[in-house]
Image (spheres, rainbow, N blue to C red):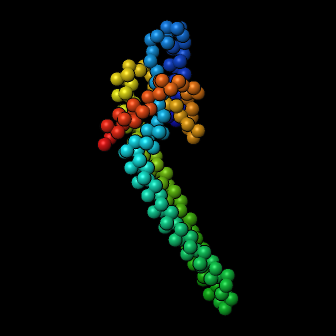
């Protein structure tokens, strides 16, 4: 949704510039582009947050792997133990079914937790990146700053000369603001 709003604002700005004439617009407006993902991945605070998210995810994966091992062991025991009575086999199959359902619920819960953490991280850092970008934009006298995007996000900017890329300045400002 945020990307769609940004794209709409970009189109509206370009339409406004076009109305005033391309020559006049080039003289009147300074534009910058930023790679927000690079700011998140390369900033000190961003690296710490991404490492914490990775650690959180890895801890969940270890738990899931242990549960998976336990399920495989139970399944193997069920297949190999021919000395079981029908009642015992039924009980073990029921145990396996209950543990498997519990495993699936846990897996879904962990995935929701990880997605919630990712969303929380993205929202928190978006606000911080916006603040750093606004400070850099104001200092540089930029009328507008666009996100370059990348292969996993919507690309609003198809081409931008390196001279208007303010990613490094925003990264430095971000690190200054978020020590």
- Give the quarter of the image for residue 89: bottom right
The answer to whether residue 48 shows anywhere in this view is yes
**Quadrant where the C terminus is found in the figure:** top left
The answer to whether residue 122 shows anywhere in this view is no
Q: Position of residue 109 (x, y in %)?
A: 50, 60
Q: Residue at x 50, y 19 (%)?
A: 13
Q: Residue at x 53, y 62 (%)?
A: 107
Q: Residue at x 60, y 82 (%)?
A: 92
Which one is in front, 34 or 90?
Answer: 34
Which one is in front, 87 or 146?
Answer: 146
- Give the quarter of the image for residue 77: bottom right
Q: Position of residue 82 (x, y in %)?
A: 68, 88
Q: Position of residue 43 (x, y in %)?
A: 40, 42
Check the image and report above or below for 34 versus 79. above
Check the image and report above or below for 154 versus 110. above
Q: How many marks?
A: 0
Q: Position of residue 158 (x, y in %)?
A: 58, 27
Q: Residue 91 vs residue 52: left or right?
A: right
Q: Determine the residue located farthest toward the front in the rendered image.
A: 163
Q: Residue at x 55, y 29 (%)?
A: 156
């Amino acid at each position: 949704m945020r990307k769609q709003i940004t794209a709409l604002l970009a189109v509206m700005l370009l339409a406004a510039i076009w109305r005033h004439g391309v020559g006049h617009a080039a003289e009147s407006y300074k534009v910058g582009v930023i790679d927000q993902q690079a700011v998140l991945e390369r900033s000190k605070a961003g690296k710490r947050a991404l490492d914490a998210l990775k650690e959180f995810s890895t801890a969940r994966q270890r738990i899931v792997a242990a549960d998976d091992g336990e399920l495989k062991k139970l399944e193997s025991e069920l297949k190999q133990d021919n000395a079981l009575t029908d009642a015992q086999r039924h009980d073990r199959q029921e145990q396996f079914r209950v543990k498997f359902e519990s495993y699936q619920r846990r897996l879904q819960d962990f995935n929701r937790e990880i997605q919630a953490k990712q969303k929380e991280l993205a929202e928190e850092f978006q606000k911080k990146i916006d603040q750093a970008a606004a400070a850099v934009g104001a200092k540089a006298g930029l009328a507008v700053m666009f996100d370059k995007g990348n292969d996993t996000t919507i690309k609003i900017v198809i081409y931008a000369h390196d001279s208007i890329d303010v990613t490094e300045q925003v990264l430095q400002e971000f690190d200054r603001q978020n020590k």
